[in-house]
Amino acid sequence: MPQLVLGPLLRYVSDTEATVWVETDEACEVEVLGHREPTFRVEGHHYALVSIEGLEPATRYEYEVKLDGEVHWPQADSDLPPSAIRTIDADKELDICFGSCRVAVPHDAPFTEPKDETEAGHEVDALWVLAKQMAEGVRDDWPEQLFLLGDQVYVDEGSPKTRKKIKERRGTDTPPFDEVTDFEEYTWLYCESWEEPLIRWLFANVSVSMLWDDHDMSDDWNISRGWLLEMQQKSWWHRRVVGCVASYWIYQHIGNLSPRELRENEIYQRIRGNQTGEEVIFAWAHRIQSMGDGTRWSFCRDFGRTRAVFIDARAARVLEEGRRSIVDDEEWEWIVEHCEGDFDHLLICTTIPWLLSPAFERIEAWNEQLVEGNAWGKPVAWVSEKIRREVDFLHEVATGQRGKAPASVVVLSGDVHHAYLAEVAWPRSANGDGAGRAPVYQAVCSPYRNPLDEKERRVVRMGFGKPLTAFARLLARAAGTPDPGIRWRTLNGPHFDNQVATLEIDGRSSVMRLDKTVPGESGKEALEESFRRRLA
């Protein structure tokens, strides 16, 4: 009899459609709300993404997951509330939780201890506490959407359980030591990250959208052409790339797509129900490698009158010196097209912050200038990519030159292991005011679970301070670095806890809330508000 290994994960949800993802231990037919889908097989692992269409808007559907006709979700011994699909209600407040960077380590000591007290300490998982409070609270308060903006798995920070399995499988005496190298080992990372009962229940009830970032592949993935060439010389790198791309496509990417997009996706149509799916997915992953071949990982979602454009900031980079860019020209045109229109709110979701702290943005721009000018040193980080293009475009969106001006434009990001909210300070217009201009924000939330230690926090705080900012601007100016053309001010932050951010959107109003984890006795952990700020 087939069993559920992972899932269900509630992925795409619109006003009339939904998709539900599962992994099973053998081939079977998966059924959700009367819609059936055969599993496909990749190296002994079995998956299905069930498309559910013809739903009613603004409706809650409790659901079960059946494998070959037998109910396997909800689990028989679970005391958690029933799982449900909630279709989009355009007239109801929309709550979107977002953040990034979640290490999968156990939820007990020493892993729940403070980072400064023990090397193994990662404190309390913000998503775990969110799920706990949801299960104990009022259903009407549950968020509708959850954005995982990078580093869902860490190839270089596996738990003791994963490291032990790697050692038993192939040994850890040679590179890459106890880091993952292939598809099978990636499946272990996803299983460890998603199998915890409360996390599993959370993902079964809240529509989840996902993007990858560097730790899904390797620390500093695609930071430069030199970095990539160096990695390609390593004997194990090709196996990791294929394993990462294939597992990301299966575990994260296909669930980002609508049923219509799935019908139009050639690889998905070839792998559906295929019992030798590795022949399809591995050959495709081999072709695209880490540089991409025109494959688009970015995607777009509409939630009533709120549009969210998710931008892949890793796989499609242009690494050629003199042309370095987070996305290529074709991808940029796709982004522009999907940001144009008539929305109440525009959310641009990307793993890497567009606006860093003012000091670090200028330091990175200075460093980029040295690299481009063949001065000295290697890039220590990626500059906020050719910021002038983005500035001009967002100004056009905010002022209604790309469709009706939204009430707010918010860039949502993670990656940097702290949280903050910044607002763009546009130059005054010719008539001296900003009438009719939408506010533009950078909202950053990181980590869900992977905090910095005190020394690292002190460095980050300096980046938000006036002395280092002034020095960094002088340094960048002396190197001939172009001025970004805008200024931005930090409204809140930086905050360094394990944390989760929420956008509360109601009509043309929007509020950002940041909640941090508060340690307590087992079962007494909680989320506590760090700040709340009206955006529109």
Image (tube, grey):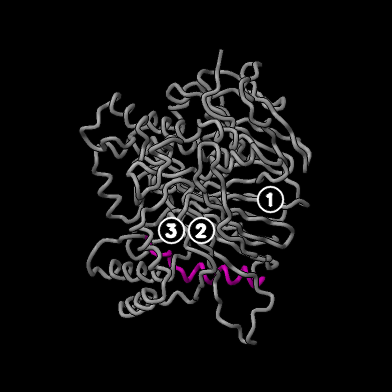
Q: Is residue 79 left or right of residue 458?
A: right
Q: Quadrant of the C terminus?
A: bottom right
**Of helix, strand and loop, which one carries label 2?**
strand
Closer mark to the observer between disc 1 and disc 2: 2
Q: Which mark is residue 388?
A: none
**What is the three-letter code of the residue carrying label 3?**
Ile
Q: In the image, residue 260 lies at what x, y percent?
A: 65, 40
As measured in the structure, the alpha-carbon distance from the residue carrying label 1 to the one carrying label 3 is 26 Å
User: Which portion, as a residue range, is magenta?
Assistant: 382-401
Q: Nearer the viewer, residue 457 or 7?
A: 457
**Of helix, strand and loop, which one carries label 3?**
loop
Crowding at dot 2, Cα within 10 Å, few <14 / some 14-19 / many 20+, comes out as many
Crowding at dot 1, Cα within 10 Å, few <14 / some 14-19 / many 20+, comes out as some
Q: In the image, residue 249 lies at what x, y percent?
A: 49, 38
Outermost residue, top side? 1
**Of helix, strand and loop, which one carries label 1?**
strand
Q: Inspect this view and state whether residue 23 appears.
A: yes
Q: Which residue is mark 2?
A: 444
As measured in the structure, the alpha-carbon distance from the residue carrying label 3 to the one carrying label 2 is 18 Å
Q: Nearer the viewer, residue 398 or 473?
A: 473
Residue under the point 61% across and 19% down: 67
Q: Which mark is residue 326?
A: 3
Q: Which residue is mark 1?
A: 303
Residue under the point 40% across and 47% down: 114
The answer to which image quadrant residue 427 occupies is bottom right
**What is the three-letter code of the residue carrying label 1?**
Phe
